[in-house]
Amino acid sequence: MTETAPTAIPPSAQVTLADGRVEIAPGAPAPSGPYANEDLLPVPAAKRTWTTYNFSALWVGMAHNTASWTLASGLIAVGMDWKQAVFTIALANLIVLVPMLLTGHAGPKYGIPFPVFARASFGVRGANLPAVVRALVACGWFGIQTWIGGEAIFFLAGKLIGDRWSGAAHIGGYAWTMWLSFAIFWALQVAIILRGMETIRRFENWAAPFVLVGAFVMLWWMSDQAGGVGPLFDQPSKLGWGGDFWKLFWPSLMGMIGFWSTLSLNIPDFTRYGRSQRAQTLGQAFGLPTTMTLFAFLSVLVTSGSQAVYGEPVWDPVQLAARTDNVVGLIYALVTVLVATLSVNIAANLVSPAFDFSNVAPRKVSFRTGALITAVLAVLIFPWRLYSDPQGYIFTWLGLVGGLLGTVAGILVADYWFLRRTRLDLADLYRAGGRYWYAGGWNWRAVAAFVVGGVLAVGGADFHPLIDGRPIPALSPLADYGWAVGLGTSLVLYVVLTWASGRRPAAA
């Protein structure tokens, strides 16, 4: 079977600028046809204007959110002390920064989003496989964050209205007013989506510092309740540094990596606006590890303090804030949660799936339509079940996400760096019959590497509370290392299959 097909769409010429960035040649027609639309086309070099500061600020805005808080405080809830939790999170973010920078390289160089970048390895049509997987993960995250925002509204209204609100009749395990709060926050985000990305960017200009100040205020409040900062540092680990800790460390590390493994794939959606490789490299290196570690440090100290004050760790900041009797302080804390959740949810969990769903049917689905599809699917995933306890949140949801997306990252890195040496043909990414058409638009080598890597990464995982048991019990020893297993397996297998088939990617 031939791996190319004739096409009536003429290729467009591309030029390489002095700084290494590539764009469609001036005067040449832009890619067109069924696999192109305005949202998916390469960003012209003149419009790639993001600086180091812009990328650092992006990570400050995304990292300072309630999910990041619960990520760190959840480690305290399962038995770690503050040193162990901060160490785990800092190491995880240094590790995930590597594929983040490697996949992000294609953004400023070619100006293309993630689903178009994935066409080089999976095929023009096959790219929909990783794109849809990534989009569904974003739907899950959007739902989780929306539930957190609804929770903040529920507790805030309960303090202001009283038992008529907080003590309302239960439906499906939650007060009907909680479901109403969830719906209100969902509708608020949809309203912002319909106003467009410019509104979102203006909002995030002040959201990040507001949330950081709120975190320090919560730390001050908890240290005051505990009688000083000493008790925040004195809470002992339930695990020690022996075998019990290391048994928990590895799945925790993979879970922490899984938290940002989503962005390690679709980071080209942002870096495509980068002024240079230096801007995206330094901006991400400054923004991601430092911000996440600082926020984790604040989170674990406050959670340790809650253990000293209340006798148990309160890992959810919304429920922790609800324990104060100071109405002004409560309102400030919960508004901070709302601002943080709104900021990260729209930026991190709508940009990618909007592009991903648009990639499935470029002629029918626009960026805005893709975002609305995400908002609807986010409810159908039942995010309240994923967020119901730290065990399921860290080890099930984040572990499965990390394993699957690590597999995709391995294929992208192998194809772009090891086989193509970062050289792509822009026009061929948008047309049938080009070098990325493979067999009917699908590269079976990438699909095989994805399936094998995914099975090894998550096949032996405990899916509780989603389902009972492990799908493939024999693979359970690999479950604690899902992200690393998925990335390493798919990377090696994709390279081996490509070379064994005699199809070495041609340079663009």
Image: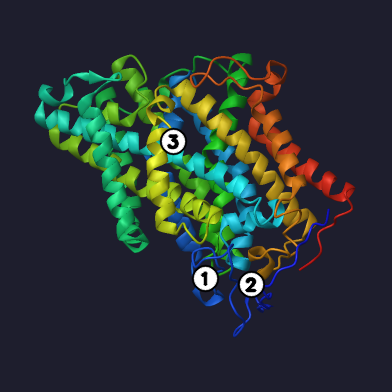
Q: Is residue 10 above or below residue 347?
A: below
How far from the left and from the top, in percent, is residue 37?
Answer: 52, 66
Q: Which residue is mark 3?
A: 297
Judged left or right of residue 196, residue 364 is right
**Amino acid found under the numbered disc labelled 2:** Arg
Q: CA distance from mark 3 to mark 1?
A: 34 Å
Q: Please tell me which of labels 3 and 2 falls first in the chain.
A: 2
Of tags 3 and 2, which is closer to the observer? 2
User: Going by the image, does 296 lie left or right of 166?
Assistant: right
Q: Which mark is residue 48?
A: 1
Q: Residue at x 26, y 47 (%)?
A: 188
Between the residue at mark 3 and the residue at mark 2, the CA separation in whole angstroms equals 38 Å
Q: Are marks 3 and 1 in contact (CB under 8 Å)?
A: no
The amino acid type found where label 1 is placed reads Arg
As helix, strand or loop, the secondary structure at mark 2 comes to loop
Query: Residue sitting at 70 percent across and 36 percent down?
Result: 451
Q: Position of residue 8 (x, y in %)?
A: 68, 72
- The residue closer to the viewer here, 360 or 47, is 360
Residue occupied by mark 2: 21
Count residues near mark 3 (Cα–Cα under 10 Å), then give few for <14, some for 14-19, many for 20+.
many
Label 3 secondary element: helix
Quarter occupied by the C terminus: bottom right
Q: Residue at x 28, y 27 (%)?
A: 320
Is there CB contact under 8 Å for labels 2 and 1?
yes
Q: Is residue 15 visible?
A: yes
**Label 1 packing within 10 angstroms: few (<14), some (14-19), many (20+):** many
Q: Amino acid at mark 3?
A: Phe
Q: Secondary structure at mark 1?
A: loop
Position of residue 286 measured from the top left corner of the image (x, y, whole percent): 52, 53
Query: Residue at the bottom extreme?
Result: 27
